[in-house]
Amino acid sequence: MKFALQINAGPYASNAGHTAYRFAETALAMGHEVERVFFYHDGIYHGLRYATPPDDEFDCTARWSALAERHRIDLVLCISAAQKRGLLCRDEAERQGKHDDDLAPGFRIAGLGQLVEAIRHADRFLVFG
């Protein structure tokens, strides 16, 4: 079965991101596919490169990056939500004279069309947060 996931809550505002991560990890272990994870609203903070949680806390960003690399999962941050919150991709950072982009490895910025496409190709669509 193919899943598409949407995460709306920030990584440390609720357990939504952690629950979504555990769901994806378990689904993949059971032989299912995760087509795409779309991060929306404050969920875009899951893709922030500079997040540095304390050592005793769950590092959502690093876990998502590693899971995406192992299973070739497309991690998409909503462009409108990211821009509103100051999170920039490389192209936009250069355009605005910034030194660096804000995206953690494995994440990219795209529009709602990517969400619609993922929903269309998935067997199940789940929203967290």
Image (cartoon, grey):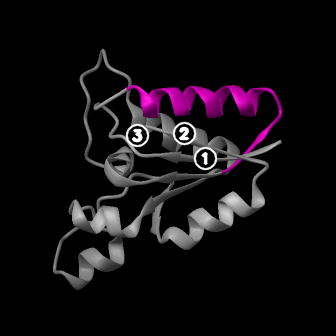
The reply to whether callout 1 and callout 3 are in contact (CB within 8 Å) is: no
Sequence order check, earlier mark of 3 and 2 = 3
Task: Indicate left or right for 42 with 122 as reference.
Answer: left
* SS at circle 2: helix
Say whether disc 1 or disc 3 marks the residue closer to the N-terminus: 3
Q: Which residues are magenta?
A: 15-35
Identity of the amino acid at label 3?
Thr
Asked whether 22 falls inside the magenta stretch, the response is yes
- Residue 78 position within the rendered picture, expressed as x and y whole percent measured from the top left: 42, 63
Looking at the figure, which quarter contains the N terminus? Answer: top right
**Residue beneath disc 2:** 66
| Residue type highlighted by circle 1 | Glu
Distance between mark 3 and mark 2 Cα atoms: 9 Å
Residue under numbered circle 3: 61
108 magenta-colored: no
Q: Quadrant of residue 121?
A: bottom right
Main secondary-structure element of the magenta-colored stretch: helix
Q: Residue at x 34, y 72 (%)?
A: 90
The residue under the point 46% across, 28% down is: 18
For the residue labelled by badge 3, is the local secondary structure a helix, a strand or a loop?
Answer: helix
Which of the two residues, 59 or 80, is positioned nearer the viewer here? 80
Left or right of 33: which side holds 125?
left
Measured Cα–Cα span from mark 1 to mark 3: 12 Å
Element marked by disc 1: helix
